[in-house]
Image: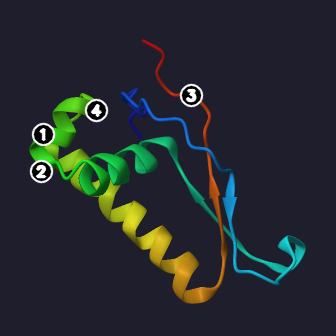
Amino acid sequence: MRPKKRRHTCCDVNATYFKPRGIPMSTLEEVVLEPDEIEALRLAHLQSLYQEDAALRMKISRTTFSRIIDSAHKKVSDAIVNGKALRLDQRQQNEE
């Protein structure tokens, strides 16, 4: 397996977890959203960039961006539909 290429991410998230209200964390399954997935969601949906432009900002190929955003959509959907906690992993992958 090839080593994961460092990706350009720039946003700091003000939260660590999102979870269903009224259910203790200890009883919930957890889905982890990686920093590159958070950045892909931000670029695609909050900044309304096309995948090609978002990929350029992250310094990755468009096909890699497509895989990342697809993974992010599946994780967020899983958390919402199945009532899981969503943990936002904020460890820094790339410091420029």
Q: Are marks 1 and 2 in contact (CB under 8 Å)?
A: yes
- In the picture of the structure, the residue carrying the numbered disc 1 is 53
How far is disc 4 from disc 2 in space, using C-alphas?
A: 12 Å
On the image, numbered disc 2 is attached to which residue? 50
Left or right: 56, with 15 as reference point: left
Asked whether the beta carbons under mark 3 and mark 1 sit within 8 Å of each other, the answer is no
Q: What is the spatial separation of the Cα atoms under label 1 and label 2, in whole angstroms?
A: 5 Å
Instruction: Please report whichever mark, 4 or 1, sits nearer to the chain's N-terminal start.
Output: 1
x then y, percent, for residue 22: 82, 84
Which quadrant: the N terminus? top left
Q: Up-down: is 37 above or below 79?
A: above
Q: Residue at x 28, y 46 (%)?
A: 43
Amino acid bearing label 1: Asp
Residue type at mark 3 is: Gln
**Image side of residue 60 versus residue 83, left or right:** left
Label 4 or label 3, whichever comes before in sequence order? 4
Label located before the other in sequence (3 or 2): 2
* Disc on res. 28: none
Element type at mark 3 = loop
Q: Residue at x 62, y 46 (%)?
A: 89
Q: Residues within 10 Å of mark 3 (few under 14, many from 20)?
A: some
Task: Describe the element under mark 4 as helix, strand or loop.
Answer: helix
Mark 2 is surrounded, within 10 Å at the Cα level, by few (under 14), some (14 to 19) or many (20 or more) other residues, namely few
**Considering the numbered disc 1 on the image, is that residue within a helix, a strand or a loop?**
helix
Query: x and y percent of residue 13 in the render?
Result: 56, 43
Residue 58's disc number: 4
The residue closer to the viewer here, 74 or 3, is 74
Q: Separation of disc 4 and disc 1 at Cα?
A: 9 Å
For the question of whether residue 61 can be seen, the reply is no
